[in-house]
Image: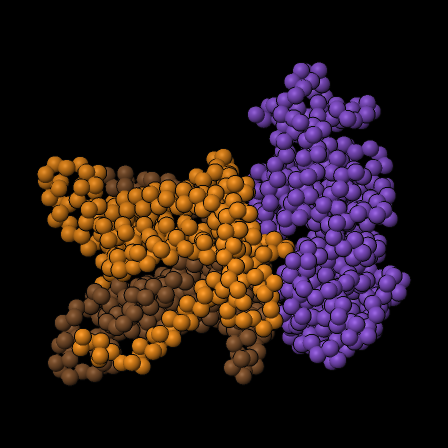
Chain colours: A orange, B brown, C purple
Amino acid sequence: MARIRSFPLVAWLLLACGTLVMASPIYWMLATALRPRAEVFAAQPSLWPSRLVWSNIGAVFTQYPTLQWLANTATIAVIAVAITVTINLACGYAFAKFRFPGRDVLFFLILSALMIPIQVILVPEFLVVSWFGLLNTNWGVILPRCAEAFGIFMTRQFMLSLPDELIEAGRLDGAGELQIFWRIVLPLSRPLIAVLVVFTFMWRWNDFAWPLVVLTDQQHFTIQQGLNLLKGDPNPNWPHIMSLALISIAPMLAIFVACQRFIVQGVANTGLK
Amino acid sequence: MPYIFIAPNLLLFSLFMLFPLCYAMFISLHDWDLVGDTSFAGLANYSRLVTDPLFWTALRQTLLYAGGAVPASLALGMLAAVGLNQRMPGRIFMRSIFFMPVVVSGVATAVIASWLFNDNYGVINALLERAGLSRVNWLSSPSWALPSLIITTLWLRVGFCMIIYLAALQSIPRTYYEAARIDGASALQQFIHITWPLLRPATFLLLIINVIYSFHVFDLVFVMTGGGPGFSTTVLVQYIFNLAFASSEMGYASAMGIALYALILAFTVLQWLAGRRSEVAMGGG
Amino acid sequence: MSKSRISAGPQAFAKGTGRRDLLKYTLAAGAAGIGARSARAQAPVSLTMAIWGDRTSEIAHRNVIAKYQQQKPNVDIKLEVTPFGQFYQQIDTRLAGRQAPDMFRIQYQQVGRYANGRTVVDLSPYLPADYGSAFMPAMWQAVNYAGKAFAMPYHTDTIALFYNVPLFEKLGIVAPTSLDKSWTWAEYTDIARRIKKDGGLPYATAMIWQTSNAYRWLPFLYQHGGRVLEDDFKTPLIGSRLGIETIAWTQSFFKEGLSPASTSIKSNEQPQNLFANGTLGMYLGGDWHMSFLRDNMTTPWNVTYMPRDVAMASDMGGNCIAVSRDCKVPEVAADFLKFLASEQSMRDFARDGALLPIRTSLAHENLQYSYRPDAMKVFIEQATTIPENLARTVGLPIWSRINQRLADQLDLAFTSDQSAETTARNIDAAIRVITGA
């Protein structure tokens, strides 16, 4: 209790103001989503909608294939998370715990992929995906982004701090390399896995530039593409757009609020010491 | 043996990253309008880069954007983390709100930001007016457009920086602070002598991530300002995108993309080396 | 699947087309004997067609497709809708990957670029000899490249002046009621000033050239008697007196505060929002804005003609549909496009989509638009003022590059202090680099 009193009121007020500022854009989304359509462009926008039109949110589900879009995005994100996290854990582990020729060059090469703006390789990447016949499929969206530099980097940093003795002990017990990875390394990596799962899921959920060129059939759209489609209508219905934007954010917010403490501790355990 | 662990990753990386990158290099040696024939151009696209005043303008605007957005998001993120690491009423709620924008997609951010900043029916100007201040042409005056983008970026990025700093703060042993208090150090002195130096690795990581992010900025510009007014928000990726898909100069766009890639790479290597040296100077971190 | 797609080709034309046409298609389809193919007469064909647009025009497209499928039940046409903002990026990428949709909607301004790259199919083998004579000359001109038709024109859009009715009544302004009485530049400027001064509005007017649609500045240039290029279509003419004066005049609306800075060329502002909420008393907008105003503006509005100077001119909006080189059955696609552009379909499509027809036979017909037929009439008349030279200029394969430079420089003139002379000089220099003049 002494700590609470010792925390200066001024600092608390500053943080509260900061919280207010950070929350206001989301509030504005909500306020626009629930506004009658006629009020949207008022030259003097009122902070509160004159009345709350809850049907705007329902209309998003009935007038557009929103549930389909959500389902598509969830499918892509879940499969992508499973593959991405698995192969990046394995790869980061190898970079941290093995010595082999070309290791450092390879590590840097993969890491440098973080630095390519997607717009630069959009066309060549599209060619590759079309050669494999993956256009308009979920795999076309999932596979190209699975080898993910951030995950490899985080894994390597984390695994460097795992004691080598554990792995050696496993080898002395006659366990195979895959068994060691599965039985010894992964159980110790739970906080890392949690962080990778949450962040990968978030990036996949929000991905836009790449699905845009791979998925052209409205039935296959992700939720971000759906949002973009509504926004691109020359006669846009802004309450609907804002409602859909909120719907697209909601799952991520729920995940974050639920896992907040977990994420902070996870990041703290992943080599930021 | 290690190759089994690397193989799946390496396969996907080679197919979907390395090959497209090499292909982009190949395109950069040609003139190609995307829909027509290609013709070999040698290094002409690269020499055009050097003499293209717009390239230098775009580079300058990108650096200005990074110079504004990166230090500010680091500073605000650190302040928020130090504040929200204390026990206080509403801490979890405040943390959640600060982090919230991180989960908002680029599309949704651009939608809401262009509404807030709209000159004529945006709520920011309405609030300014209600407070007795004059309206600002946020997105349509050459002096305010870039700051508007930076403010939006801060909203997006501060939460991410905060989380990383929070994590770093939690790994600082409490005993350091207790010892300092016994020695009679003030809160400010504790920050300068304990917190600040021990946050260096996190700062270093965030610096690299945020600089890369700044050099990649595109969605916000594309939706909020279209690179204007004039060239005041013409940043590199936006210029590259315009060259590729609006004026159909894919060869030149690829050359610029490769140049940008090289630039970020060089910057990161330099920063990495500098970071290592300072770590060594500090006694191994 | 692909085998049956190919084999269905000639059959698709056997129904509902004349004997002479059938012969023509057979020849066009190539020498591979028709006998073997007709054995699988009812084999299904599926085609994809990419469009952008609002819901109204999407529904209009679907209606035409449904009617076509009543005639040709074996042809399935799937519509892909992409927002305009990403449309060309997506099409170009897919063309580069040889995975383009069979048919795609394009603006007239883009035909030259695709035709020049041979990424779209020459439709002339599938069309009767004087097929184009039934269309408005500017539109037929726009889809032709090197003497061949590379796309099927099916509608146009154009720009006219929307105004706030109560405001005009209050200020005693009477809008012109016929094309030949449209306001001159001087009158238009004067009315804009009155709206701001006497009407008490923050701004008066705006033009819809945002998101770098710089080609919509051209009508003003042509109204003033100017042109972009010499007859060689290489040497730039913006630096002429006429070009500089047009830049200065369009710039004056921003300098005088008659137009909001946010309605400059690179901005993403939408002037129809500002008109709907009473920030503007009038604005130059497109016929496709009417459904927006119906849904978002409570104050009564009306439409009158674009201002004129020494000449009348308006924007060449509207679209055509091209068949991509990736289409396996171009003859089937071409048959659908002929159906789409037939008199009956064009009439229905224009009415359903609230768009303008481009067959001369429909120009003076009462199309029975369901919403504001009076306003549509103004747009239809205005569409007759699209200069043919403008159509040729924006149809050049290099137009997209010129458009980009035009947008850069005009935006500088409208949002900074760059003089009209400097702007014109910079545009000309950029054009010379592009055309090699």
Q: Quadrant of the C terminus of chain A?
A: bottom left
Q: Is residue C218 above or below residue A135?
A: below
Q: Is residue A24 above or below residue A97?
A: below
| In this rendering, position of residue A137 left or right of residue A95 | right
| In this rendering, position of residue B80 left or right of residue A245 | left
Q: Can residue B90 be seen? A: yes
Q: Is residue C246 above or below residue A108?
A: below
At 78% across and 71% down in the image, what residue appears?
A: C168
Residue C422 placement (x, y as % from top left): 71, 72
At 74% across and 52% down in the image, what residue appears?
A: C371
Q: C413 or C422: which is nearer to us?
A: C413
Residue C52 placement (x, y as % from top left): 63, 48
Q: Quadrant of residue C277?
A: bottom right
Q: Residue furthest right?
A: C180
Count the marks.
0
Q: B22 or C304: which is nearer to us?
A: C304
| In this rendering, position of residue B155 left or right of residue B41 | left
Q: Quadrant of residue A167?
A: top left
| In this rendering, position of residue B279 left or right of residue C322 | left
At 77% across and 32% down in the image, what residue appears?
A: C125
Q: Quadrant of the N terminus of chain A?
A: bottom left
Residue A18 placement (x, y as % from top left): 38, 73
Q: A177 or B22: which is nearer to us?
A: A177
Q: Can residue B221 be seen? A: no
At 67% across and 27% down in the image, what residue appears?
A: C73
Residue C188 placement (x, y as % from top left): 80, 71
